[in-house]
Image (cartoon, rainbow, N blue to C red):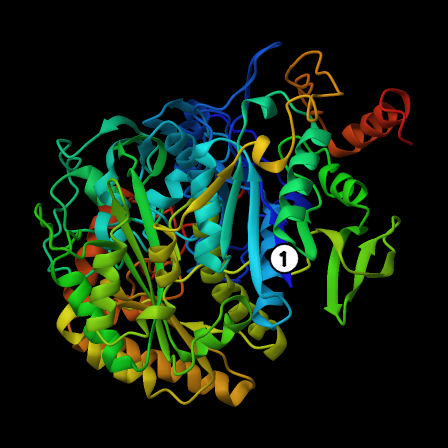
Amino acid sequence: MSSKPALITDPDIILGYLTDASNTHGRAEALAVPADVDALAATLRWAQDRGMPVTVTARRTGTTGAAVPDGGLLLSTERLSQVEAPDIVGGGALLGPHQDTLEAAGQHFPPDPTSRYECSVGGAIVCNASGARSFRYGATRGWIDWVDVVLPTGERLERVSRDTPLPAGWPRLRWAEPPVKTAAGYAPADNLLDLLIGSEGTLGVITRAGLRLRPAPAGVLTMLAFFPDLETTLRFVDQARSGADRARAPRPKPGPLNPRAIEYFDPNALEMIRARVDLPAGATDALLLEVEHEGEAPLDRWFEALVEGGALAEHTVVAEDEQGQRRLAAIRHALPAGTNERVVANRMPKVGTDFAVPDAALAEMMAEYRAVTLPHVCFGHIGDNHLHLNLLPRDATELAEARSTYRRLAERAVALGGTVSAEHGIGKLKRALLAHQVGPETLGAFAALKAAADPAWILGRGTLLEPPPAPGGAV
Amino acid sequence: MKIGVCLKQVPATDSPIKVKDAVSGVDLAAVKMVINPYDEFALEEALKLKDAGIATQVIVYTVGPADADARLKDAVARGADILVRIDDPGLAAADSLGFAKALAAAAKADGVGLILAGKQAVDTDNAQVPAMIAELLGWAQATECDKLEVAGGGFKAWVAAGGGTRDVLQGSLPAVISTDKGINSPRSPNIKGVMASKKAPVAVKDLAALGLSAGDVAAKVSLKAWGAPPPRPAGRILQGAPAQVAKELVGLLRSEAKVI
């Protein structure tokens, strides 16, 4: 039997690890904060010997409860935060600060989740995190070359890459992921790296990662463009992305408009930012556009396109330098902050969507969102047809209505060929939606994979899949 | 009324600052330059007064080399009317008083009735130039203003008075007001403004054009040496059982840090 690892059992310390950004609360009997990979692997072996549930916890910025434990042991990666080289970092290293260091040296690691200054690299990998710039660069998956991982059994694997086959006995998943940005379910991958990416802490613990870097762009132009109605806005989205070099449709020779991100603000979102920006009369919707460029910013080209596209073009707010871009970022970040203020004022949780649909279904999905009569605010990654509709119920009746609206919209997104989660993942909160999206056969294949990888089913119990009864095991 | 705005180009506050050596100062080669954030408040306040019809023209002044033009053009993109850059070899080694003399002469020559400037520049943090301009011109002044009203040839300025309190100063124009955080939220330029700003001319004036000589602006303050602040000593993490660690911490706060 393995020897007992150093465990923290002080409930006051554990308390700080029992929740994530989903605001759900869990319970755990003990916390391990291993100082190195040896200690981490020994902890997992010890738990495996006892059949003790283990929940990996990094920085707890997830919104779906994947890091919220349901008893057992919490295993924190926070001390594995070493930066060995610009492209080699520990799983517990913070993402945003490392990206800043890279940028200062002219390099770029593109994934830009909103939580990047709070989240860990390992967390971003197992959540396959993405953000606005995923339109151009795709999610985290495309920017990871290899990882070191400790499997649920405590087995250590180093430099797991796309050349690494699945371990013996792990079934190869074959299911058709929807053709959209998605973070729902295990990837149908034939290699271990791609399977681990997006596995939400159920198949292993990422202890080190090899990042793929690219040169930082020479210049970035950011624009906040206003539109007189939704229809004009959507037409412009189609125009802006038709020639774009985007992750889902790479185009080595892009057209004249080649944004790296297209973000959307609905009328309620515009109300929320009214104090921070001069809203032109007649503006109902807005797009935040980011464009990389060499030399002079392509202002004339975009102005012309906005005029032709029917935007309130002259009022487009522009930022060419970091100072201006920070101002626009503050406007963008006022939306989640404003939403949370409403949540506090309402004393009711928000119900937020994370669905994405194919390009052809965007208008239909937007019409569904627009028809919602409950108080709400809608913004997000429209370039990827991926909007966050935040329903803001004011009482219990509206909360019930919001939940049924959410469920109905999720089913609609699936019916349109989309996903129930484009970036936040499934965690513990959206298992039913995942089941609806993939169907019983694929769900069964997920469970068979999980059982092969983790026979005692100790790691990340309750995330993605309904777990079998706990084997038990005391600390 | 014309309003003059003093605008300084400074290193971005998140740029890593390296001292080259004790004599030649800071290495600015790889540093991003931005408008001094406090000057952005001054510019915004001037633009608001223009929007309200109180000012007819906003003239932006800076002292510095041609690479400051990009910052000046940003001001035009937001709505400033005239850009003036004061550039003269005589100013290369000037101190705050020299800069204040140049700026005061330029603003006076243009007939401005109010000068707005940030309360300090975030590079040298001297906070001297606005007050010096006011003294040189014999104008009223209010520094660290976070609320301003201008009407009927006078102004009312809310300024920090220490200890979290504020004074409300009333005075008559012409005046120099230095702006603090909280006075406004600087606007972002719109696309038409940015496109037009690319072609905006910058009037470059040397000391002679301002009726000054190199002797007039010669530094009275001499800089002895440049150096980085001493590195912060590493923190200490106390290990052990919480009760023991708490006891040890209290002991250290008392005996070593002497804060309790």
Residue named by callout 1: B3
Q: Crowdedness of circle 1 by 10 Å Cα count: few (<14), some, many (20+)? A: many
| Camera-side residue of B118 and A207 | B118
Image quadrant in which the C terminus of chain A is located: top right
- The chain identifier of the residue carrying mark 1 reads B
Q: Residue at x 26, y 32 (%)?
A: A215
Taking the spot 21% from the left edge, 44% from the top edge, the residue there is A195
Instruction: Please identify the quarter of the rendering in which residue B1 is found.
Output: bottom right
Could you say where residue B227 lies in the image, as x and y percent from the top left?
Answer: 65, 14
The N terminus of chain A, quarter of image? top left
Q: Nearer the viewer, residue A290 or B186?
A: B186
Name the kind of residue labelled 1 in the image. Answer: Ile
> Where residue A372 sits in the image (x, y, percent)?
37, 87
Toward the top, the furthest residue is B22
Q: Residue at x 60, y 73 (%)?
A: B53
Q: Quadrant of residue A395?
A: bottom right
Q: Is residue A406 above or below residue A104?
A: below
